Image: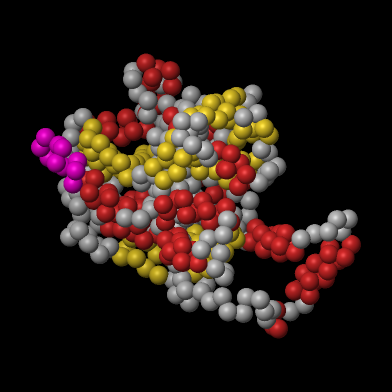
């Protein structure tokens, strides 16, 4: 796909909505020229190119060779640096526009296999039980392993009301299985809310896209209007939230803090070392005096970890759930001409206490497993985090796996099975545990914990 120059410029201005990137100006001058100081390594590259062009068994297109060289360079750095054009930019545009017809899945290509990063909450795929970490092997009976991600995504898209059969391999299960999903109009609504019993509010943030901070503030105001009396607590749900805008993570954290540092980032280039402080845009803590629980899990990454880390370090919220993903790096989107861009890792970020979440993630104050997942025990060892990604940045603190996986399971409710919970009408154990914690703990007592 060729994006028109004006649309592409707008896309670059909005790219921070998708993957925790901070935009910096970049020049495209001299892209076609090789710096004379590059050294003999570029001569090796050019020599290999010439040999391939002259001697490979079939003619090879220049674009294919150059793209392969670019992808190879970036793959040697870390899992998050990438060259974006065509379908990649189209997916970025879709995320920004927030409306399309399809299944509602975020997917990546993992060693030739289409892997589900996460289903969007409330999407057709989510309702049919597709889970993060699932592998899609066939679409309507056709093998997609070893193919192009763009082709698989195009097949999953389609008019609302039409259906497609997915063959799923789920780690922890012996055999693959089929799921038929009816496509729908996917409205990527980043913030949803509802008032739970006992005047406890629930706000879910699905991604850190444009205006999330303002949307959460509006959701809180709506909850207060719906409540009969004062609010007794708030659950902020960041589970399966892959991140997004660094600025929106700062804005959301600022809603609950009246002073102090929210996050800092440190990079090698000039201008990449920055500190973000609370500015009290809404004149202090919008939920002052109200206890807050933040839910996280292995799918909470990047911007989600910034918020959880800031509220944890300032003791403004109790962090509950599972250890987060552990993506502690910042990507900068640099334009390359009019129809391509380079997403490059340029900095690491740190919580107010100076803790890097890279690899280790955010460790919750209260460990609560998702017992509602019947495949939990089998899938646990296959759970994907940053530290499992090939070529990930190494945390300077030399973390040990056994320290990261410590878990408190002293609550008798943790022994319940998924079937027992379902019989009690509990579909989401982590959320239920958070709500019950707030209901049975007086605001004053919980405030002291914070």
Does residue 386 sit above or below 367 in this rendering?
below
Q: In this view, does 209 lie to the left or right of 79?
A: left
Q: Quadrant of residue 370?
A: top left
Q: Quadrant of residue 64?
A: bottom right
Q: Is residue 284 left or right of residue 320?
A: left
Q: What stretch is highlighted in magenta?
A: 221-230
Instruction: Work out whether residue 409 or residue 344 is closer to the camera in this orientation and state it.
Output: 344
Does residue 13 sit above or below 146 in this rendering?
below
Q: Residue furthest left?
A: 229
Q: Can residue 14 be seen in this view?
A: yes
Q: In this view, does 221 lie to the left or right of 364?
A: left
**Magenta stretch contains residue 327:** no
**Magenta stretch contains residue 228:** yes
Q: Please report the residue visible at 75 percent of the width from the left and 74 percent of the height from the top.
A: 42
- Give the x, y percent position of residue 373: 46, 27
Q: Please report the residue visible at 37 percent of the width from the left and 33 percent of the height from the top.
A: 430
- Give the x, y percent position of residue 316: 27, 50
């Amino acid at each position: 796909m060729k994006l028109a120059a004006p649309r592409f410029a707008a896309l670059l201005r909005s790219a921070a909505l998708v993957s925790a990137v901070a935009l910096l100006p970049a020049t495209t001058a001299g892209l076609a020229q090789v710096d004379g100081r590059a050294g003999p390594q570029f001569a090796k590259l050019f020599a290999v190119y010439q040999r391939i062009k002259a001697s490979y068994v079939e003619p090879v297109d220049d674009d294919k060779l150059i793209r392969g060289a670019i992808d190879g360079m970036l793959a040697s750095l870390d899992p998050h640096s990438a060259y974006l054009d065509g379908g990649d930019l189209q997916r970025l545009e879709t995320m920004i526009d927030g409306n399309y017809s399809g299944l509602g899945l975020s997917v990546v290509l993992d060693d030739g296999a289409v892997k589900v990063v996460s289903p969007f909450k409330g999407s057709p795929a989510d309702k049919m039980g597709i889970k993060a970490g699932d592998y899609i092997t066939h679409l309507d009976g056709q093998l997609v392993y070893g193919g192009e991600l763009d082709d698989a995504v195009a097949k999953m898209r389609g008019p609302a009301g039409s259906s497609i059969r997915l063959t799923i391999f789920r780690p922890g299960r012996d055999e693959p299985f089929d799921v038929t999903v009816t496509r729908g109009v996917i409205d990527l609504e980043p913030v949803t809310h509802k008032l739970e019993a006992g005047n406890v509010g629930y706000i879910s943030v699905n991604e850190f896209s444009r205006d999330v901070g303002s949307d959460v503030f509006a959701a809180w105001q709506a909850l207060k209007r719906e409540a009969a009396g004062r609010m007794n607590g708030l659950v902020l749900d960041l589970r399966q939230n892959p991140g997004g805008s660094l600025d929106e993570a700062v804005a959301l954290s600022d809603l609950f803090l009246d002073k102090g540092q929210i996050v800092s980032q440190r990079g090698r280039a000039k201008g990449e070392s920055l500190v973000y402080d609370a500015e009290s845009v809404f004149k202090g803590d919008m939920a002052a005096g109200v206890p807050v629980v933040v839910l996280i899990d292995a799918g909470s990454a990047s911007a989600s970890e910034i918020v959880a880390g800031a509220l944890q370090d300032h003791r403004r919220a109790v962090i509950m759930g599972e250890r987060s993903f552990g993506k502690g790096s910042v990507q900068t989107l640099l334009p390359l001409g009019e129809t391509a861009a380079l997403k490059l890792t340029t900095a690491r970020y740190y919580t107010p206490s100076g803790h890097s979440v890279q690899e280790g993630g955010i460790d919750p104050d209260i460990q609560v497993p998702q017992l509602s997942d019947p495949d939990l025990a089998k899938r646990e060892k296959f759970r994907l985090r940053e530290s499992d990604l090939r070529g990930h940045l190494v945390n300077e603190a030399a973390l040990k796996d056994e320290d990261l996986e410590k878990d408190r399971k002293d609550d008798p409710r943790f022994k319940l099975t998924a079937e027992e919970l379902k019989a009690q009408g509990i579909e989401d154990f982590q959320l239920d545990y958070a709500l019950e914690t707030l209901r049975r703990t007086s605001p004053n007592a919980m405030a002291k914990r914070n």
